[in-house]
Image (cartoon, helix red, strand yellow):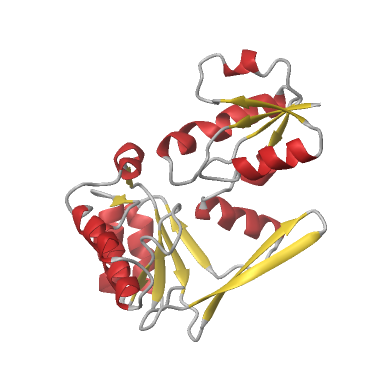
């Protein structure tokens, strides 16, 4: 057996390489962005690629390559069933609803009129989210209809950047005051007010849809569970002081 692994030293690649070496599994390091990547994989049984939801090039290409290979009979990780809804809260909404999984009541609209009609009937507060992003990026508390209407107009107007520079700077300042990061990190965050991240530039604005969820009061932690074969582990993130987000 020979496994192709997309080399990226920042992620799980090193662990995969070490595991294969320890267990006598053949490995072929590859760059999935090579134009002839399909040919390079001819002598491989599988491809592993830890693609990143905050890398704009990965989000535009990784799932397509993995799907093409899987449909052609090649083993891939992650496979289509694992990754099609990765970093896509809208996809997750419809997945949970279709299988009857527990889900905070969620509301997605793809026209300004439908969204505005809903804001007049909805109870508040609500929570606004973009379909992608992590670390509570661009997650906002919607206190009343005025807030909701403003978000709807922006969603169907100039849109939202995936990177919230001002919110990110405030979070860096909070961490600095708590001793969790350096002042250099705060300076870097200040620079991002003027210089957007490469990811947000390539990704472009989120627009043409709006997504809300019911607000669940009283939460003190965010629980994350990771399941791999017959093993399961998790961790808890505490809600930030003076905030509703973990």
Tell me what residue is drawn at x 60 percent, y 45 percent.
12
So how many labels did they put on this image?
Answer: 0
Q: Position of residue 157 (x, y in %)?
A: 24, 49
Does residue 129 appear to the left or right of 29 in the view shown?
Answer: left
Residue closest to the far bottom = 218
- For this orientation, the residue located farthest to the front is 22
Classify residue 222 by image quadrant.
bottom right
Above or below — where is 220 with respect to 134?
below
**Residue 35 location (% of width, % of height):** 51, 16
Q: Nearer the viewer, residue 203 or 16?
A: 16
What is the quadrant of residue 138 in the picture? bottom left
Residue shown at the point (38%, 79%) measured from the top left: 243
Would residue 138 be found to the left or right of residue 107 on screen?
A: left
Residue in the foreground of this view, choosing between 115 and 37: 37
Which one is nearer the viewer's eye here, 169 or 129? 169
Q: Viewed as shown, does residue 74 lie left or right of 67?
A: right
149 up-or-down from 80: above or below: below
- Where does the image place residue 128, in percent across and percent down from the top left? 39, 65
**240 up-or-down from 136: above or below:** below
> Residue 196, relative to residue 32: is it above or below?
below
Q: Residue at 71% of width from left, 66% of height from top? A: 233
Q: Quadrant of the N terminus?
A: top right
The residue lying toward the viewer, choosing from 159 and 116, is 159
Residue lying at the far left in this picture: please name it: 194
Residue 66: give x, y in percent of width and height.
62, 31
């Amino acid at each position: 057996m020979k496994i192709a692994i997309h080399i990226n030293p920042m992620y799980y690649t090193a662990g995969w390489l070490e595991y294969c070496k320890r267990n006598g599994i053949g490995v072929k390091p590859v760059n999935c962005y090579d134009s002839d990547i399909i040919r390079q994989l001819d002598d491989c049984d599988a491809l592993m690629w830890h693609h990143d939801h905050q890398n704009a090039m990965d989000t535009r290409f990784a799932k397509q390559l993995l799907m093409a290979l899987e449909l052609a009979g090649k083993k891939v990780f992650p496979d289509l069933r694992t990754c099609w809804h990765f970093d896509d809260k809208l996809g997750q909404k419809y997945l949970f609803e279709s299988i009857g999984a527990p889900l905070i009541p969620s509301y997605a609209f793809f026209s300004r009129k439908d969204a505005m009609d809903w804001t007049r009937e909805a109870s508040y507060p609500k929570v606004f989210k973009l379909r992608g992003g992590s670390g509570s990026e661009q997650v906002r508390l919607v206190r009343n209809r005025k807030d909701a209407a403003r978000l709807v107009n922006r969603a169907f107007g100039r849109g939202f950047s995936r990177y919230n520079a001002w919110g990110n700077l405030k979070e860096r300042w909070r961490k600095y005051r708590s001793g969790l990061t350096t002042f250099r990190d705060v300076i870097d965050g200040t620079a991002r007010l003027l210089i957007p991240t490469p990811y947000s530039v390539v990704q472009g604005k989120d627009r043409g849809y709006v997504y809300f969820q019911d607000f669940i009061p009283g939460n003190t932690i965010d629980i994350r569970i990771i399941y791999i074969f017959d093993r399961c582990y998790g961790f808890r993130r505490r809600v930030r002081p003076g905030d509703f987000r973990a």
